[in-house]
Structures are given as structure tokens and as C-alpha cells.
Image (cartoon, helix red, strand yellow):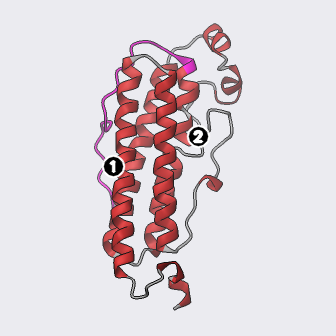
Amino acid sequence: MWSYEKRLQYPLNIKKRNLKAAQIIISQYGGPDGELGASLRYLSQKYAMPNKKVAGLLNDIGTEELAHLELVGALVYQLTDGACTQEVIDSGFDKYFVDHTLGIYPQAAAGVPYTAAFMQSKGDPITDLMEDMAAEQKARTTYDNILNLVDDPDIREPIKFLRAREIVHFQRFGEALRMITDDLDCKNFYAFNPALK
């Protein structure tokens, strides 16, 4: 069970509307390496994780990813709030607008809608943690790409915060992988699969 604090994990105060930035940032809402996939991935993987500490870590990070999803959604909303039709057309936001108006919809920057194919849950602790480490690096790279494309400090600071959290999550999953491999009683940990006991 979760307790919800009615505040963003990082404060936002976008002063200047920017639909072009919103078009790329939305990828971290529902794109292939975004926060929606991360939260669902970790919250799904926790059930089959044999180590209770690692299962707890997956739950904690999955929950934090939901907070990041909220932050990215709020950022996209503030960047588009109040846009007029001409701004939508001039910025190239019209293709999104025709399907979603200015609502927040989970999709990649290229317009591909969120799909569960963006995430994986195998039930094998080694496989899942390697997936998680890769996912955090891909998200970090996406945030790097966003930082290379935007110059507004009101946008850059929350993106830098989110990027830093991806690095921390990568490190925590590395620690979890070491815990799992330390628990194994066979020398070749790649042979481990809990379904084949």
C-alpha cells in the first residue's frame, strides 16, 4: 500500500510555453525507455524475485518511477498549457493535437503509443536485473538527448534531476545483482533459473 504526497518529487515552474520541447519530453512519459515502462517493469518483476530485499528494492524504485511519470506528465502539461491553434500548428504539435488535444498521452517522441512490449518481466532474477540496469542506462541516455535539445533552465533542471535518479537506480540494481549472485549455490550463475528447481 502506498501513501501519496500531493506534491511533485521535484518542483516545476515553467514560465515559457514550449510545444517543441513537450514533443520530445513526452517520450519519457510513454516512450520505449520512459517512466511508465520502468514503473510497470519493476512493480511486475518484484513478485518472482526470490530475495525479499531485492523484491523490496524493485517495489521502492517502481514506486519512485511512478513519481517520475507524474513529474514528466506535469512538465509536458506546463509546456503546452494554454497553447492556441496557431502555436500548435507552428510548432508541429498538430499531429499529436488532432488525437489528444493538449491531454497527456503515453507515447514516444516519434508518436508511437505506449505498449507493454517496451518492458519485460521474465521471472529469472539475473535476467530481470540485467534488464533493469539496461533500462536505467537507456533512460539516462534519453535524458542526455533531451538536455542536448533544450536550453531553458526551467526545463533542464528537472530533467537533470531525473537523469541523476536513473544513475542511482542503475547503481542500486547493480548492488541487487551482486546480492542475487551471492545467494546462488552454483558456480555458474547463468545456469540458475528458479523454474527449473
- Does the residue at mark 2 contact the one at mark 1 (Cβ under 8 Å)? no
Task: Judge by depth and name the residue closer to the eye, 119 or 133.
Answer: 133
In terms of image quadrants, where is residue 162? Answer: top left
| Residue type marked 1 | Val
Report the residue at 37% width, 46% height from top. 167
Report the residue at 50% width, 66% height from top. 128
Callout 2 crowding tier (Cα within 10 Å): few <14, some 14–19, many ≥20: many
Report the residue at 41% width, 23% height from top. 155
Q: Main secondary structure of the magenta part?
A: loop
**Quadrant location of the N terminus in the rendered image:** bottom left
In terms of image quadrants, where is residue 33? Answer: top right
Can you identify the residue that label 2 sits on? 106
Which mark is drawn over residue 168? 1
Q: Is residue 14 magenta?
A: yes
| Residue type marked 2 | Pro
Residue 75 appears at what percent x and percent y? 44, 28
Q: Which callout, 2 or 1, points to the residue nearer the camera?
A: 1
SS at circle 1? helix
Which mark is drawn over residue 92? none
Residue 89 appears at what percent x and percent y? 68, 12
Query: Extreme bottom residue here?
Result: 197
Q: State which region is magenta.
A: 1-20
Residue 38 lies, with reference to residue 59, above or below; the image says above
In terms of image quadrants, where is residue 104? Answer: top right
Q: Tell me the CA gap for discs 2 and 1.
A: 24 Å
Q: Does 99 sit left or right of 37 as displayed?
A: right
Residue 176 appears at what percent x and percent y? 35, 66
Residue 50 lies, with reference to residue 42, above or below; the image says below
Query: Extreme top residue here?
Result: 86
Q: Does 16 sit left or right of 2 as displayed?
A: right
Task: Judge by depth and name the residue closer to the eye, 149 or 99.
Answer: 149
